[in-house]
Image (tube, helix red, strand yellow):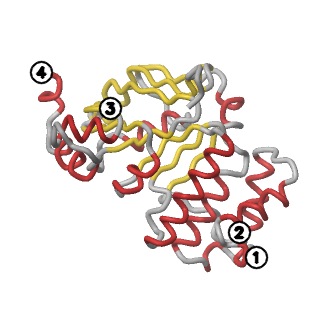
Amino acid sequence: MSKNSTLILEVKNLAKKFGDYVAVDGISFDIKESEILGFLGPNGAGKSTTINCILGLIKPEVGTIRIFGKDLFKKRSEIMQEVNYCSAESNLPWSLTVNECLRAYSALYAVKNASTKIDELLERFEIAEFKNKRMRNLSFGQRARASLCKALLNDPKLLLLDEPMASMDPDVVDRGIKLLLKIQKETGMSVLYTSHNMWEIEQVASKVVFVNHGKVMAQGTALELTRQEVQLEAKEPDLREVFIQLSRKAPEMEEK
């Protein structure tokens, strides 16, 4: 983290409803420069809705989002040139080859020396041999790595990762985590990282925010949350147990 602790992302009092359903209910958190934030919670907790708000894909009823110190909804096009996203649920166009997909996204982000950048990322994620293979013919894990290549094309200052390695086997996940951390240190990018694999979060996150029922239930380092929710004198983080404990705790209990 930089010494001046510049705020890259500020989310304040965010609220979003779909009809009578409250998906996000007053969520606030921030990400500082070069920080990796683990964004955790059970299915339906409000994580994806929050991320879609941060991407400007949906607009909240209440709250503000500032990225790079700018109001998202006033400067979205400008901001998104320096943001990128990868999700296990998002697929690159199946009829295109890996190279065609990445060249198309390179054009959207006005990536200089796109061919060189694409080749570099494919090599680093160990899928260069699939460059001219159509997306529909790749395995789930290969598609996930191609999506990570896409997410890093523009050297984003803010990277949003939603279960980026859900389709990969443990060995590839381990190598992928190490590579992401290496790239993050090289570039200084800030990252919001969601996963149901608590080991991933323990490896990458300098801070964790846990949400449930659309509210922030707890935030701090993995060890701080372990001591708060599991064992006061814990020496090592145990986010799996933290996840279980906080998933079973009602928001109103947290507020008392």
Q: Quadrant for residue 205, please give it.
A: top left
Whether residue 83 appears in this view of the structure is yes
Q: Residue at x 62, y 44 (%)?
A: 185
Residue that mark 2 sits on: 98
| Amino acid type at image mark 3 | Gln
- Which of marks 4 and 2 precedes in the sequence? 2
Which secondary structure, mark 3?
Answer: strand
User: Disc 4 marks which residue?
Assistant: 256
Residue 75 position by quadrant: top right
Q: Is residue 151 left or right of residue 56?
A: right
Q: CA distance from mark 4 to mark 1?
A: 57 Å
Q: 10 Å neighbourhood of mark 1: few (<14), some, or many (≥20)?
A: few
- Residue at the spot 41% in from the left edge and 55% down from the top edge: 200
- State whether residue 6 appears in this view: no
| Residues under numbered marks 1 and 2 in contact, where contact means CB atoms less than 8 Å apart | yes
Q: Is residue 74 left or right of residue 195?
A: right
* Residue 111 in picture, x, y percent from top left: 81, 47
Q: Which residue is mark 3?
A: 219
Report how far apart the C-alphas of labels 2 and 3 lie in the structure. 38 Å
Residue 132: assigned label = 1
Label 4 crowd bin: few (<14), some (14–19), many (20+), radius 10 Å: few
Quarter of the C terminus within the rendering: top left
